[in-house]
Image (cartoon, rainbow, N blue to C red):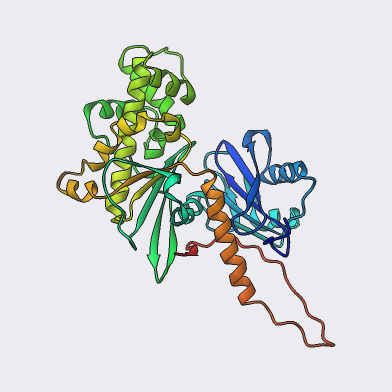
Amino acid sequence: MAQHSYPDGPRLLADIGGTNARFALDHGEGRIGDVRTLACADYARFEDAVHAYLAQHGGTRVRHAGIAIANPVGGDAIKMTNHDWAFSIAAARRELALETLQVVNDFAALAMALPALGPAEMVQIGQGRSRAQSVIGLLGAGTGLGVAGLVPAGGRWVALQSEGGHVALSPCDAREVAVLQYCWRRYEHVSAERLVSGPGLSLIYEALAYQEGQWQAAPLTPAAIVERGLSGADPRSRACLEIFCAMLGTVAGNLAVTLSAKGGIYIGGGVVPRLGAYFADSPFRARFENKGRFREFTTQIPTLLITALYPALRGVAAILADHLAEQASHAIPAPHPGRAGLTHPTSTMETENHHARL
């Protein structure tokens, strides 16, 4: 570990979703390892999960940490949307004895990893071709629906943090209208995330059962719906997958035209990779292109499924490295001999714009 290691020791990285928290240690540029996934529900607090992870690695001492979290980040207070963790960044930094604790939105971190992905770390769905130096869009379904953008600016990339998963969902056919009508009975606002997510699969299943007159149908987990839908054993589960993929195509197409994302639309999250080869043949791409007078525009934009391992960890590592380099460039000069000098640990709460080299 000595060669190319950081002089101040490994850096802690985390990618925290509504269900799981994935931790790792960054030992040096391009050397992320010791990855462990902890269930969020097993720990009362974010800090408890960090303590548990570090304890699994012999109480490794870290000075700097970068955390990507499935949540808006706009100040010191973090309160997760899809889990009950809530914490102060400054207080967590003190408890964990960190000099730096940088917390960023998880999809902003994932966006920062996109320019470094190789051809073997993605699969193109449908036609289209990426244009260099163009805006990139990103979305992904998991416990929620993450959305972000990536904008080229002066030889660097700027990540655009977004909460686009909470926009109102627009139905595009009679079957989707019926699903929305079922949801409107329960929710004042039906967001894209409500249906285009893991829990959304279960909600779609409930809506279809209701339409078939089976009000008391036993609920199914997202995993069961995917398994039964892919096997063809359950027509209702298969219909759930069709509706889910079509709705994802609608949201992806909306993002493409909103951002003019000629660099492509990337798809992350935990749900779509579980669909395997079915996703390429699903209604996703046809719905993505179905933008009326703008069909020619969306047809030219590629949609790319991310298959890389732990890309958000790579993104947050890049964000943290940039931050520490910037801090070093503005470091207080060494005190004059004979004079006392003070240094202060940093607590980075959030930056709306994150940069990395092209």
Q: Closest to the observer: 337 or 350?
A: 337
Q: Quadrant of residue 34?
A: top right
Residue 112: x and y in percent read 48, 56
Establish if 20 lies above or below 99: above
Left or right side of 143 for 302:
left
Residue shown at 39%/21% (left/top)?
Answer: 230
Q: Is residue 160 visible?
A: yes
Residue shown at 69%/42% (left/top)?
Answer: 49
Residue shown at 32%/35% (left/top)?
Answer: 247
Q: Quadrant of the C terminus?
A: bottom left
Residue 196: x and y in percent read 39, 35
Residue 47: x and y in percent read 70, 46
Establish if 126 lies above or below 11: above
The single residue placed furthest to the right in the displayed view is: 338
Tell how many labels: 0
Residue shown at 85%/88% (left/top)?
Answer: 338
Left or right side of 351 for 22:
right
Q: Quadrant of residue 58?
A: top right
Q: Closest to the observer: 169 or 188?
A: 169
Establish if 295 lies above or below 63: above
